[in-house]
Image (cartoon, rainbow, N blue to C red):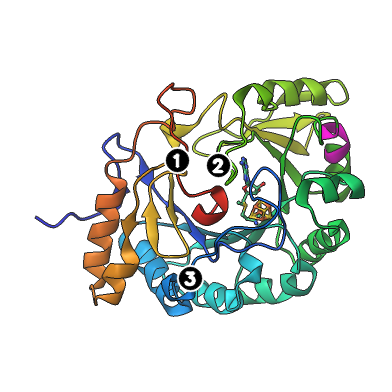
Amino acid sequence: MTATGGLVDRFGRTATDLRVSLTDKCNLRCTYCMPAEGLDWLPSDKLLSNDEIVRLVQVAVTRLGVHEVRFTGGEPLVRRGVLDIVERCAALEPRPQLSITTNALGLARMAAPLADAGLDRVNVSLDTVRQDTFLKLTLRDRLHDVIAGLAAADAAGLRPVKVNAVLMRGVNDDQAPELLRWCLERGYELRFIEQMPLDAQHGWRRDEMVTAAEILDMLSREFDLTDAEEPRGSAPAELFSVNGGPATVGVIASVTRPFCGDCDRVRLTADGQVRNCLFATDESDLRLALRAGATDEEIADRWRAAVAPKLPGHGIDDVTFLQPSRPMSAIGG
Ligand code: SAM
Ligand code: SF4
């Protein structure tokens, strides 16, 4: 019998939030993500075209109950056609919420056109507001571009402007309060994310990771943090009101306090593979099905079958944990 309905796994979790990687390429080299020399990029014949991406998003939205779509990568803004993709996804019925996770290079120029195309929000990755640390962390001297990109996103109404930060021991782990102060002054919502074992170089060490508990401890020395009322739900950030609110800061404890039990995400890579988890070791090929002429319902069935066996958790703390062969930049973070 043909399965119907949404993307439900065997533990009853329903995926409604689709992360779409537009490219595996990037113009930064964040040391926790990519090696200095870059990676072997996906060959162009394996990349989904704009039409193919929009078709898959349309299947997800119209047949599978997806109502939130986030474009990511790699760096999604380096993909030509990003405006076309956003515009066509914004025209889908029912219209999904559309956002982009970006390093903000080029956002100064792109923010207004993206908003006009129908983008609702941006998440900008920024780990430091010091130029020397930025260079050390990303291997590129582009902090000024990120700052300009953030301002342009705010001016274009892509609000709330969210900032994601990863702390690296010995690099920027002393800068959490400074980054929060900087974001508060500009009205940006800051979220710290624990570093995960998803770097291409396999350099992640559990005992070197800056934990959520440490981050909260550092912030609490300078700010009055209280539990924000917003329920955590499936949103992975634990939110805290800063100095009585309304400003908040979030901590995403992906490793030390995983939120897998409430996960509502599913991922589509730039080469058309469905991954039911960042840490999945299996993928399901939708590109091949698409190019072989599959109907929308056949694609939807494949997609449901890909989500059904999703594991209960990422298992980073298990002795048997295996880092997925694809790094974060090729999966879509
Ligand atoms: N290039 C875009 C950007 O940096 O926002 C989008 C892709 S990037 C892979 C998405 C997010 O993943 C960024 O916020 C980045 O900081 C985060 N990230 C990358 N590698 C990570 C890791 N090993 N652990 C935790 N977060 C990571
Ligand atoms: Fe590029 Fe984003 Fe990875 Fe940094 S985190 S190297 S910006 S893909």
On screen, residue 239 versus residue 232, left or right, reads right
Q: Secondary structure under badge 1?
A: loop
- In magenta, the rendered stretch is 175-179
Q: Which residue position holds label 2?
A: 198
On screen, residue 271 versus residue 332, left or right, reads left
Q: Which residue position holds label 3?
A: 43
Identify the disc placed on residue 21: none
Q: Quadrant of the N terminus?
A: bottom left
Q: Which residue position holds label 1?
A: 279
Q: Nearer the viewer, residue 114 or 327?
A: 327
Where 122 sits versus 193, above or below? below
Residue 292 place in picture, x, y as percent: 24, 75
Amino acid bearing label 1? Phe
Query: Mark 1–mark 3 contact, CB under 8 Å?
Result: no
Amino acid bearing label 2? Leu
Q: Nearer the viewer, residue 19 or 16?
A: 19
Q: Secondary structure under badge 2?
A: loop
Real-space CA distance between mark 1 and mark 3, rounded to the nearest whole angstrom: 23 Å
